[in-house]
Amino acid sequence: GIELPQLRGRVLGPAARAHLDSLDVALRAATATPATASDAMPAPLDFDVWAAKKRLEAVGELSSEGGAAPPGVWEPLHATLRALAGGPLAALLMALLVDGDGRTSEASELAVTADAACAKLAAAAEEEDPEPAGGGLRQRVERVKGAAAELVQARQELAKPSGCDPRRVLQALKALPSVWPVGGDGGSSDEDSQPLRTIAVDVCRRLAAKFAEAGQKAIDSNGDVAKKLAAVGVLAQSAQDAHGALSEVAPGLEAVDFQGPLAAVSASRGLAAAEAELAKESGMNPAKILQGIKDATPFWAAACTADASLPTRFADLYDQVQTRMAESMLDAVTTHNEKKKQGLLKFASEFDKTCAAANLCDSKGLAVALQGRLESQLTLGASDSE
């Protein structure tokens, strides 16, 4: 018959295998549907860290009796745990770090337990346990947790249904370069930083949208709109600079335009003012039209990148300006009103210069040339009167 010690030796390996298989199933289930970019703050990760630690501790304890098991039992188990540590377990730890407050300690404890179990399996298999690229799981968690904490703070602020303070998000972005995970050679650790990079881009996109919302609120509010827009613009520029600094330590970070959405809001406001003035059947003030164009154009290129409808809106507006100015010039020529003629030409000159500075074009992509059209009309009128 089989003696009790021999029987126990035969069940050590299958028991450890059962624990690892159960852990594998739980890890893959927890990481099968990662949070998407549409989640302002993803739902808490559904994973029992305590149960996972107990399974790993059990594997370590079973492997401590390695000598009692038949030859060849521990080598494949060691390989299995190393594969888990390099794949789903590492992914789970990264997910825990960005899951929200209170899970950083869980990630650290689970990483330490996994490293210890892997070392014990290596000893039982009488194999060396070479440190994987980037170090053990505990080291990887330590490298990532600083940046993860900043990103969690930023996402929590952005997820607020009201009262979000973009300055707090900006503060977190500015802190990221100093805590971004780097490899042993000082370069970025792509394997560890990729999940962080994805979240950082999402945070940046949401922050850019917040700036656009703040710009629209400034326009809709009473008071000094220009001053309020300028204040938001300063924050947007600071965010752009922070993104640039982060890109230096995280090569390949997706570009995010913080100023474009805000510029689009400002440009739309300027065009709306000019459009409203042109809509008047009488009493139209050319100076207000010109001011609207000036308000719309300081960051025209960035605005058009964020809102593709702006060039078409301007082209339509320009067509209306040409029609109204041509009507006014015809009246001036007919009534021999020299003062009105010169006023219209002066307006056309300033209008052309403003449009040229921002590279504004008509519907055919040609440069704005209102002054030339009015001068031609004036010349034609003079010839007809002779």
Image (cartoon, rainbow, N blue to C red):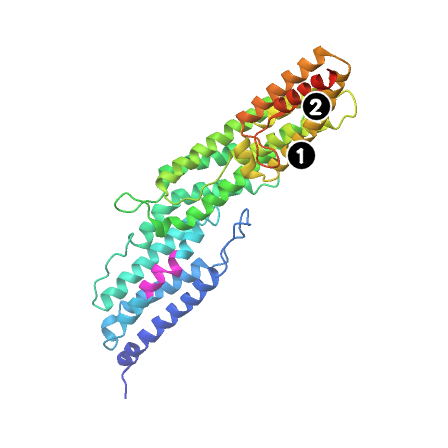
Comparing 180 with 296, the one in front is 296
Q: Is 87 covered by the magenta stretch? A: yes
Comparing 101 with 88, the one in front is 88
Q: Residue furthest bottom?
A: 1
- Residue 370 image-quadrant placement: top right
Residue at (68% x, 22% y) in the render: 377
Residue at (35% x, 66% y) in the render: 58
**Which mark is drawn over residue 325?**
2
- Contact, CB < 8 Å: mark 1 with mark 2? no
Pointer 1 or 2: first along the chain: 1
Amino acid type of the residue that numbered disc 2 sits on in the rendered structure: Met
Circle 2 Cα neighbour tier, 10 Å, few/some/many (<14 / 14–19 / ≥20): many
Q: Taking 107 as reference, is 329 above or below it?
A: above
Comparing 222 with 125, the one in front is 222
Q: Position of residue 177 (x, y in %)?
A: 37, 38
Magenta segment range? 81-90
* The N terminus, quarter of image: bottom left
**Which mark is drawn over residue 316?**
1
